[in-house]
Image (spheres, rainbow, N blue to C red):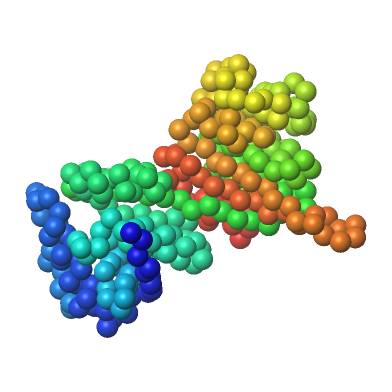
């Protein structure tokens, strides 16, 4: 049964209800050594936490059934803690709804991503976070730290803007990185790769490899090679394997046009670069929007949004 929830930002007046939900939720878990510090929370400590950093509550029929607190101790990342659901309301999507709202708030407020601490002794908890795309990025005492970077959306209304965005991205790329580019014909995929090539200092020119399927551009500045692939004529991951890209992926930056759905197996981490165009009237250049979505452990704690900000160009 799906229940209808209201997920709203926590206010100090929610403190007593949140403290009750936190205690019930953490007390229902298997015993831990050392015990969860959440069991020591009370209405006063919760009230202070909400006043300092904020949080969320999930309400069902006017009753608080779930809650989480925010943590602003890391720059540009929204931390989550005390993620709790009343035992009687678990397995109904309450935690997923709260985390979804937290991610939407983090996105709207310009955070690079989210992070939290979890206990490996709780397999259900581990599965929950990993299913949501969080990756293990460190340890803090008895806790495992998991992180998730958020997609970046940027306007690129001209070839120069497209190449400028690619150049900012090139600054955080390293050998082994894979980019999968998607967009209709003429959207600007090759233009984006040209911006990468110029910023990486590779031998050019970088042109569409449609008929040769792939081109290798060695570095002229002792940096990573750029491997430029066009998968438009390929129909399966097996055909991508036939290009023998495994031999070059580890030592270069691989940019694959039309690669979505056939090239993800090349690495456990990749950037999905989607270029969307909007129709305009007259002779104006089509408006373009680029969405760069990170996948996998490589990108879990990279400050991608901050790195791609034009203010840092």
Quadrant where the N terminus is found in the figure: bottom left
- Residue at 71% of width from left, 26% of height from top? 233
Give the mark count. Answer: 0
Quadrant where the C terminus is found in the figure: bottom right
x and y percent of residue 242 in the render? 60, 16
x and y percent of residue 103 in the render? 43, 60
Quadrant of the rendered image containing residue 58: bottom left
Residue 286 in the figure: left or right of residue 89: right
Name the residue nearer the viewer: 200 or 249: 249
Name the residue nearer the viewer: 32 or 222: 32
- Residue at 69% of width from left, 51% of height from top? 276
| Residue 112 in sight | yes
Residue 202 in the figure: left or right of residue 260: right
Name the residue nearer the viewer: 77 or 83: 83
Q: In the image as oriented, which residue stretches furthest toward the bottom?
A: 13
x and y percent of residue 225 in the render? 62, 27
x and y percent of residue 157 in the render? 75, 56
Residue 133 in the figure: left or right of residue 237: left
Q: Vertical placement of 53 versus 262: above or below?
A: below
- Residue at 90% of width from left, 57% of height from top? 283
Residue 192 in the figure: left or right of residue 281: left
Q: Vertical placement of 144 versus 55: above or below?
A: above
- Residue at 66% of width from left, 41% of height from top? 182
| Residue 78 in sight | no
Q: In the image as oriented, which residue stretches furthest toward the right?
A: 283
Quadrant of the rendered image containing residue 236: top right
């Amino acid at each position: 049964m799906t229940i209808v929830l209201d997920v709203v930002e926590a206010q100090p007046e929610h403190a007593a209800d949140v403290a009750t939900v936190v205690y019930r939720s953490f007390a229902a878990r298997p015993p831990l050594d050392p015990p969860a510090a959440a069991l020591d929370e009370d209405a006063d400590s919760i009230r202070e936490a909400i006043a300092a950093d904020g949080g969320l509550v999930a309400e069902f029929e006017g009753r608080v059934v779930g809650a989480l607190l925010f943590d602003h101790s890391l720059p540009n990342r929204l931390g989550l803690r005390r993620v709790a659901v009343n035992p009687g309301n678990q397995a109904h999507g309450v935690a997923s709804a709260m985390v979804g709202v937290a991610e939407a708030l983090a996105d709207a407020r310009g955070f690079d991503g989210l992070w939290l601490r979890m206990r490996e002794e709780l397999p259900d908890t581990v599965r929950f976070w990993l299913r949501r795309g969080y990756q293990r990025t460190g340890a803090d005492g008895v806790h495992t730290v998991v992180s998730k970077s958020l997609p970046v959306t940027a306007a690129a209304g001209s070839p120069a803007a497209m190449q400028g965005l690619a150049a900012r991205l090139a600054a955080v790329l390293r050998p082994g990185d894979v980019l999968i580019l998607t967009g209709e014909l003429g959207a600007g995929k090759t233009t984006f790769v040209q911006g990468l090539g110029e910023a990486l200092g590779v031998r050019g020119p970088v042109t569409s490899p449609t008929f040769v399927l792939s081109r290798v551009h060695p570095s002229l500045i002792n940096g990573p090679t750029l491997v430029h692939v066009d998968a438009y004529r390929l129909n399966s991951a097996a055909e991508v394997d036939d290009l023998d890209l495994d031999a070059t992926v580890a030592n270069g930056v691989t940019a694959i046009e039309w690669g979505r759905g056939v090239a993800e197996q090349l690495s456990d981490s990749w950037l999905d670069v989607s270029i969307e165009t909007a129709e305009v009237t007259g002779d104006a250049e089509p408006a373009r929007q680029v969405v760069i979505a990170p996948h996998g452990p490589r990108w879990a704690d990279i400050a991608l949004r901050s790195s791609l900000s034009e203010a840092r160009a």
